[in-house]
Amino acid sequence: MRVRFIVNPKAGTGTNGALAAAIMNGAREELLGMRGLFEIKVSTSRQDAFRLSREAADKEYDGVFACGGDGTVNTVASALVGTKTVLGIVPAGSGNGLAHALGIPQEVQKAVSVISTGHVLSMDVGTACGKYFFSTAGVGLDAAVSKEYGKWTGGGGRRGVLPYLPIVLMEYFMAEPERVTVRWDGDVFMGNPLILTVANTREYGGGAVIAPEAEPFDGLLDICMVEKAGWLKDATLAMRVFKGNLMASKQYRNIKARAVTVVRGSAGLVQLDGETFAAEAKISFGLLPQALRVWAF
């Protein structure tokens, strides 16, 4: 067995200096007994992480571990879509959405042990704007928050869950939900949702569950819409997000579909696994069933 570990040295909350050493110890214990070979590569950029991952897939490595946050996971996974190489995750970010969906623990040794004690599964992959997403995509409040969080961390701000709170509050009070038309499987919705997320897994990350019934193995996307109803009701709904019981809220609508088209009044942002991009007014969200092999517990 040959496994490559790709480490993002900037991932997580800024206490990530010992990550490569911890991976070395965990991989040695896990793989040497199996007569396996492993290597650790520290990426210098997103493009470098993609290149290293694709190179491993082209050389038919058995697995590639993304060691970092959701951005690193998205980059590595994108390079492995449609290949036989299995994605592993050592979660070291502030969100770790896909890692949670696959049951991957935070501790490095336990995360690496998925090779021998976990399972290899084939999960669905979301598509939008010529890119892949593995957990969530969105064009509403989540996209605005993701953009501001990216500016915060890019400017040297500390990573982690805590910086999200003031950003969410600021973007919530500034938000003016735009009118959208959403089409799926022959049905249509027109309205002004505060949140419009297309989900492949249950959560954004950090325990924020936007799609309680989403499964990355069911061949379906979950369309999640939340109406703005005043700060008191919205605060109650926010608590539901972290309790995982959004389905009980009248503000919340969840629809399962194979494909989704969203049309806005003008071009704007879209977030894919927490990374924001400029997008056209019309966005088509699709799904590639069972297109990525993953290690999961």
Image: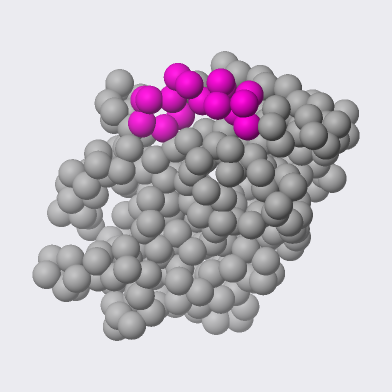
The x and y percentages for residue 234 are: 20, 68
Q: Quadrant of residue 218?
A: bottom right
Q: Is residue 181 magenta?
A: no
Task: Give the answer, above or below, for where 96 lies relative to 261.
Answer: above
Comparing 37 with 214, the one in front is 37
The x and y percentages for residue 64 are: 72, 35
Q: Is residue 17 magenta?
A: yes
Comparing 75 with 228, the one in front is 75
Question: Quadrant of the image for the N terminus?
Answer: top right
Lateral position of residue 118 relative to residue 18, left or right? right
The residue range painted magenta reads: 11-26
The x and y percentages for residue 265 are: 39, 57
Question: Quadrant of the image for the C terminus?
Answer: bottom right
Q: Residue placed farthest to the left in the image? A: 232
Task: Give the answer, above or below, for where 43 lies relative to 236.
Answer: above
The x and y percentages for residue 188 are: 50, 78
Task: Give the residue at x 51% y 25%.
Answer: 19
Q: Is residue 276 visible?
A: no
Q: Residue placed farthest to the top in the image? A: 44
Q: Quadrant of residue 122?
A: bottom right
Task: Give the residue at x 59% y 68%.
Answer: 215
Comparing 33 with 154, the one in front is 33
Lateral position of residue 173 relative to residue 162, left or right? left
Task: Give the residue at x 32% y 54%.
Answer: 141
Task: Give the residue at x 21% y 54%.
Answer: 172
